[in-house]
Image: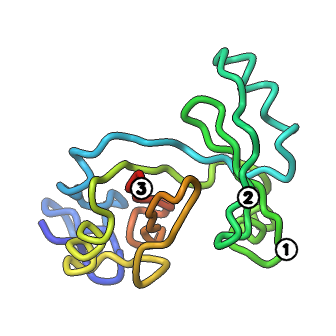
Amino acid sequence: MSPPAHGNPPADPGGDPAQPTGIPPTVPQLASLELDHVAIAVRSFDEVRGVLEGLTGHAATSPERVESQGVEVCFVGNVELIRPVMPDNGVARFIARHGPGLHHIAYRTPDVAKLMGELSAQGYRFTSDSPMTGRGRHRIAFMHPKSAGGVLVELVEHG
């Protein structure tokens, strides 16, 4: 099934086509990908780092600044803590609207540009026209939440 235009969920095939199910269509290209990490937006690493270290037994990595995104990140296991360092970027706006919390989920792909092209051809939208450089020089792209059931999905190609 191809995704509906503009990221709207598909109509319920057994009911009124005007009444969406609220469940986005399955994306075969993502179904086979490994979960890379989940990201939590924070005002300060100290808000969550100690709790996650205690719960998981993993020590936090040293913070790394990602200038292109206007953030600083550190990892505790497979959980990325993401802190805005500029007041007008997407993470800062997210925290202003929603408070600290789950920001995005990320899937690992061997070729982020190829996957972006395939998904764009199916009608999925992205927050950028091409892959960007993320932490560790990984290539990344973000699917627009309106194309992914309200969830910000990151695609990560490890460098």
Q: Secondary structure at mark 2?
A: strand
Q: Which residue is mark 2?
A: 65
Q: Is residue 114 above or below residue 52?
A: below
Which element carries disc 3, helix, strand or loop?
strand
Amino acid residing under circle 3:
Val
Q: Position of residue 17 (x, y in %)?
A: 21, 73
Mark-to-mark CA distance, 3 and 2: 17 Å
Mark carried by residue 156: 3
Local secondary structure at mark 1: loop
Q: Which residue is mark 1?
A: 87
Which amino acid does the dot numbered 2 rest on? Arg
Task: Out of 98 and 64, give the one closest to the viewer.
Answer: 64
Residue closest to the eye, 16 or 35: 35
Which callout, 3 or 2, points to the residue nearer the camera? 2
Q: Is residue 83 left or right of residue 128?
A: right
Q: Quarter of the image holding residue 35?
A: top left
Q: Quadrant of residue 94?
A: bottom right
At a point 85% along the width and 74% down the height, the residue shown is: 87
Disc 2 from disc 1: Cα separation: 15 Å
